[in-house]
């Protein structure tokens, strides 16, 4: 439910409900087109941008028309009578006014032509320029935001996920709120949500930069509190080194931004949440009981928080989580209003996460202040069946490598994945060997059968593994290289108890046909 286009008319009233407006570049080609121009002449933006303006006003060549308009556009006689051509070929008598525009926004330089077919509006040249630039900034902000967001929430076995964005009704309509969902190793999934006090194109720049940083940190498979801590460090470094105009502008907007990062593990059925001053999610169980998690709030980014304390809790399968930006709290009045709104949305809407998200957005929309936008992320947790996960504890003994191969092969045959036996035996053998040689007990081997086949080996050491190319005369050193060659992707993640090295292999379509989508 993305209603960002709905902000166009509200954010540029002079262009939406007043005179039509279009921009012409130095070559006489149309480079911009307002909603009112669409209604007046029947062309949509895609139909006219890049075409000569003479197709709309064939009486005079562009150079002559431009000179006449700019000469006529004085305080005493700002309008010039002319005739434009409608898309269907009929003449449309209008009054025209022109003003030159130069802006930092890409593609917004040229001559803006205002066209009125009715009573001449009382609009000055400055008002016309400002109205056009607001309209152009709205289009630029919306376009940038759409390009930065993923098309859909990820299709994931760990959770059903959907999102919604409600634009602000004033300004450009686009503010600095964002949400994201990122698949992690071990069938886990991460959710992030944040708020930056900025709007328009600047908002898309800020959330683009901070969103890219969060995605990069997610790839490192860090604990939620570490992700928040490192993002805080990034913002603090900008604040300490703000010596030029760009960095000062950036710092002023990012320091004090709020951020929340959560990771759901469908195997252990646990959710870990860490926040930097951002409201915690609301959770609804299968019986409809709704409450807001009591996660430590901590201070916003760049404010000198020494430790970002996390919340670690167990969630039942089928729980519904609502992640939201701060505007929802303001709309509801208090944190207590958020669970009431979610409860009402669940009672009135259908059972799917899309229904809950749409119902929440519909209830929140009339409560939002005109300057507030709202990002929502609705998640329904899934759990991996015990029949899809098998874990074995192994001794720190070289003889355990042969046992690991036998255990893996037996389980693959039970799952009907015997064709993956050679590669999986090799992966398990190399990972278990590394754990025995360089790690510490406890050592565990785990297989997960989902949309991929995942082989994991955990041990009690935090020593970092490094892949390398062994020389032809070397007797060892090929373990992780072989793991990488036999898998689609592999990696390592760390916990307070040690590390886990994992590798994923692709499955044929028939091996995943009965898995949740």
Image: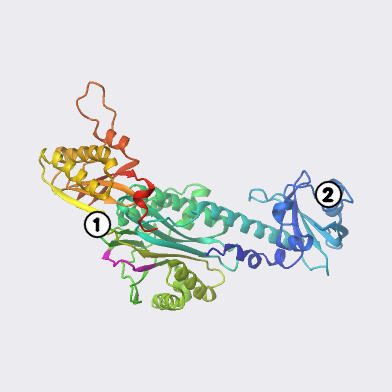
Magenta segment boundaries in residue numbering = 312-321
Q: Which residue is tagged 1?
A: 387
Q: Earlier in the sequence, mark 1 or mark 2?
A: 2
The spot of residue 428 in percent (x, y) is 22, 41
Q: Residue at x 64, y 63 (%)?
A: 8
Within 10 Å of disc 1 (Cα), the crowding (few <14, some 14-19, many 20+) is few
Disc nearest the viewer among 1 and 2: 1
Could you tell whether 227 is left or right of 212 in the image?
left
Label 1, label 2: how far apart the Cα atoms are: 71 Å
Q: Quadrant of the C terminus?
A: bottom left
Quadrant of residue 188 within the rendered picture: bottom left
Observer able to see residue 451? no
Residue 318 in magenta stretch: yes
Vertical order, 25 against 157 (above or below): above
Please say whether residue 4 is visible from this viewpoint. Answer: yes
Mark number, residue 441: none
Name the element at disc 1. helix
- Report the front residue among 12 and 350: 350
| Magenta run includes residue 190 | no
Instruction: Answer with left or right where residue 188 lies relative to residue 441.
Output: right
The vertical placement of 172 against 472, above or below, is below
Give percent across and percent down for residue 1.
52, 65
Query: Which residue carries the number 2 mark?
Result: 54
The residue at 87%/51% (across/down) is: 58
Secondary structure of the residue carrying tag 2 is helix
Mark 2: give few (<14), some (14-19) or many (20+) Cα within 10 Å.
Answer: some
Identify the residue at horizontal 27%, vertical 62% (top origin): 270
Quarter location, residue 417: top left
Q: Position of residue 289 (x, y in %)?
A: 34, 77
State how many labels appear.
Answer: 2
Q: Choose between 243 and 352: the one closer to the eye.
A: 352
In the rendering, at what x and y percent does residue 244 appear?
50, 47
């Amino acid at each position: 439910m993305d209603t960002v286009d709905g902000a166009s008319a509200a954010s540029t009233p002079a262009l939406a409900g007043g005179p039509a407006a279009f921009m012409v570049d130095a070559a006489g080609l149309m480079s911009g087109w307002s909603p009112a121009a669409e209604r007046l002449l029947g062309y949509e933006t895609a139909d006219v941008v890049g075409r000569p303006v003479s197709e709309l006003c064939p009486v005079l060549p562009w150079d002559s028309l431009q000179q006449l308009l700019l000469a006529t556009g004085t305080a005493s006689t700002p309008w010039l009578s002319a005739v434009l051509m409608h898309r269907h070929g009929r003449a449309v008598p209008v009054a025209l006014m022109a003003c030159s525009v130069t802006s930092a926004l890409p593609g917004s330089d040229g001559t803006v032509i205002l066209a009125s077919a009715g009573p001449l509006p009382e609009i000055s040249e400055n008002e016309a320029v400002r109205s056009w630039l607001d309209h152009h900034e709205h289009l630029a902000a919306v376009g940038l935001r759409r390009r930065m967001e993923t098309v859909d929430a990820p299709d994931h076995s760990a959770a059903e996920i959907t999102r919604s964005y409600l634009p602000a009704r004033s300004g450009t309509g686009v503010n600095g709120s964002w949400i994201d969902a990122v698949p992690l190793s071990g069938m886990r999934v991460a959710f992030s949500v944040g708020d930056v006090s900025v709007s328009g194109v600047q908002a898309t720049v800020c959330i683009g930069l901070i969103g890219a940083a969060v995605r990069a940190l997610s790839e490192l498979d860090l604990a939620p509190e570490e992700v928040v801590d490192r993002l805080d460090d990034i913002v603090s470094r900008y604040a300490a080194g703000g010596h030029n105009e760009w960095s000062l502008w950036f710092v002023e907007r990012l320091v004090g931004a709020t951020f929340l990062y959560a990771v759901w593990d469908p195997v252990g059925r646990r959710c870990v949440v860490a926040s930097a001053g951002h409201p915690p999610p609301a959770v609804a169980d299968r019986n409809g009981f709704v409450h807001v998690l009591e996660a430590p709030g901590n201070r916003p980014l760049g404010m000198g928080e020494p430790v970002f304390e996390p919340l670690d809790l167990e969630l039942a399968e089928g729980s519904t989580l609502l992640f939201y930006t701060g505007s929802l709290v303001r709309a509801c009045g208090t944190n207590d209003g958020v669970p009431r709104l979610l409860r009402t949305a669940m009672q009135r809407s259908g059972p799917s996460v899309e229904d809950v998200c749409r119902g929440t957005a519909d209830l929140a929309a009339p409560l939002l202040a005109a300057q507030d936008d709202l990002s929502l992320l609705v998640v329904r947790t899934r759990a991996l069946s015990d029949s899809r996960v098998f874990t074995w504890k192994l001794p720190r003994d070289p003889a355990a490598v042969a046992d690991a191969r036998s255990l893996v092969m037996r389980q693959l045959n039970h799952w009907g994945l015997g064709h993956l036996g050679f590669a999986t035996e090799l992966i398990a053998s190399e990972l278990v060997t590394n754990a025995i040689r360089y790690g510490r007990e406890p050592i565990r081997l785990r297989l997960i059968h989902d949309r991929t086949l995942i082989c994991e080996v955990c041990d009690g050491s935090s020593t970092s593994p490094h892949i390398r190319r062994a020389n032809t005369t070397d007797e060892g050193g090929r373990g992780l290289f072989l793991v990488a060659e036999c898998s689609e992707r592999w990696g390592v993640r760390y916990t307070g108890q040690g590390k886990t090295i994992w590798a994923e292999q692709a499955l044929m379509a028939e091996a995943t046909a009965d898995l949740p989508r």
